[in-house]
Every structure is written in C-alpha cells, then in structure tokens.
Amino acid sequence: MNDNGKPRRTYRSALREKQQGETRESILRALGEQILNSRPGEFSLPEVAERAGVSVRTVYRHFGSREALIEALQEDAVRRGTPPPPTTLDELIALPPVLFASFDAHAPWVEAMLRAGAGSAIRSAGKPARIALFKALTAPAVAGLPEAEAAATQALVKHLVSAETWLAMREDFGVDGPTAGWAVSRTLQAIFAGLEGR
C-alpha cells in the first residue's frame, strides 16, 4: 500500500530487465575467466566485478552471496546445454556422445570448471549427487559382484562419463567430443555385457 492507502503498482521495464540480464551474464562470464586464474577454492569478488565492469555491490545485488554466485554459475552450465541426467542404465550408456558434444560446445566454461582454481571447488559441490546417481543407475548391474568389485566398477563408470575423461581425450589425443563419447559408450556396453555374462 502507498501513502494514499492504494495498492502499489509494480513497475516493469523490458529494457531494465534486459540490462539486468546482460549484467548477470557479464558477471558469470567474468567469474569463469577468474576461475581459470585462481588458486583452488579461491576467487576474488573485486576482480570478478572489475572484469565484468560493475561494482562489487552490483555483484551482491544480483547474486546475494558468494555461494549464490557459484550456484548460479553451475546452473548456467546446465542452461547452456548440458543434457538432462540419465534415468536408466540404457540412457547412461547412450549419454557420452551427447554429453561430450555439449562439452565441446562450451569448452571454455568446462575447462574453467576443471582447471586448478575455484572451479574444482565448484564441481565438488555437485559431486555427492553425481556419485549417488551413478550408484543408483549401476546398482542392478553390479548386484552380484563382491562389494569391492561393485564399488570399483561403479567408480570406473563414473570416471568414464566425466568432463575429466572428455578433456583428457581431447588434449592427449585430439579426439572430438562425439567421437570420445562414442568410445566411452562402447566401453560401457562392453563392461555391462561382461557383467551379464558372469
């Protein structure tokens, strides 16, 4: 209510919303650049703000906290084309070519997340959920194995379907994302076919 007892009108401006969106994108892009040059777990909000051409106060106005800024960067990666997580073992086996192609499309961001610096801390935040997903999807396939072998198989599968594997194949052998993903999918098929034969 305003001073006259009437409901306040909400003010919306398409131009202002566009500018806010551009500022937000600029801050996230600056954070990605900063991550490439920082030590593990660290990045400088003043430098992020400077790179984005805004004040530190503006960074806080858009994101509220350092943690919210990190979460927004993770969400931005998903929004930029990371495929949805698999829900079945067959979807998991089919995922690598699509996933690795999306890594190719967003290589600078993915590399920022993998390189030494705050990127490793950001990736660590989502690690428990990724591990739980891989365990759930592969549990039926490893059910008959001794506990240590089951855990080793699940760990191998998780490692194969990862940005780290994509980057190693890209840097060490010059393999593009879809081809690397194809090789990982074939490897997963062989692993699970071998388990069925036991």
Image (cartoon, rainbow, N blue to C red):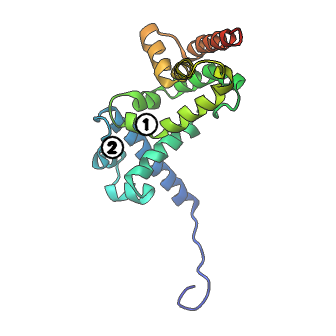
Q: Residue furthest front?
A: 146
Q: Which amino acid does label 1 sit on?
A: Ser
Q: Identify the image quadrant of the C terminus.
A: top right
Residue 18, numbered circle: none
Q: Which residue lies furthest to the bottom in this view?
A: 4
Q: Name the residue under label 2.
A: 51
Compared with 72, 100 (above or below) is above
Compared with 104, 31 (above or below) is below
Q: In this view, does 124 lie to the left or right of 100?
A: left
Q: Is residue 67 left or right of residue 163?
A: left
Q: Which picture quadrant has residue 8?
A: bottom right
Compared with 130, 9 (above or below) is below
Q: Residue shown at 44%/56% (left/top)?
A: 62
User: Depth check: 29 or 148 in front?
Assistant: 148
Q: Residue shown at 63%/32% (left/top)?
A: 136
Q: Is residue 28 visible?
A: yes
Q: Residue shown at 64%/23% (left/top)?
A: 95
Q: Which picture quadrant has residue 190?
A: top right
Q: What residue type is labelled 2?
A: Arg
- Residue 38: percent from left, percent from top: 29, 36
- Residue 90: percent from left, percent from top: 71, 22
Q: Name the residue under label 1.
A: 124
Viewer-nearest of discs 1 and 2: 1
- Residue 154: percent from left, percent from top: 56, 22
User: Crowdedness of circle 1 by 10 Å Cα count: few (<14), some, many (20+)?
Assistant: some
Q: In this view, does 142 lie to the left or right of 73?
A: right
Q: Which picture quadrant has residue 191?
A: top right
User: Depth check: 174 or 134 in front?
Assistant: 134
User: Crowdedness of circle 2 by 10 Å Cα count: few (<14), some, many (20+)?
Assistant: some
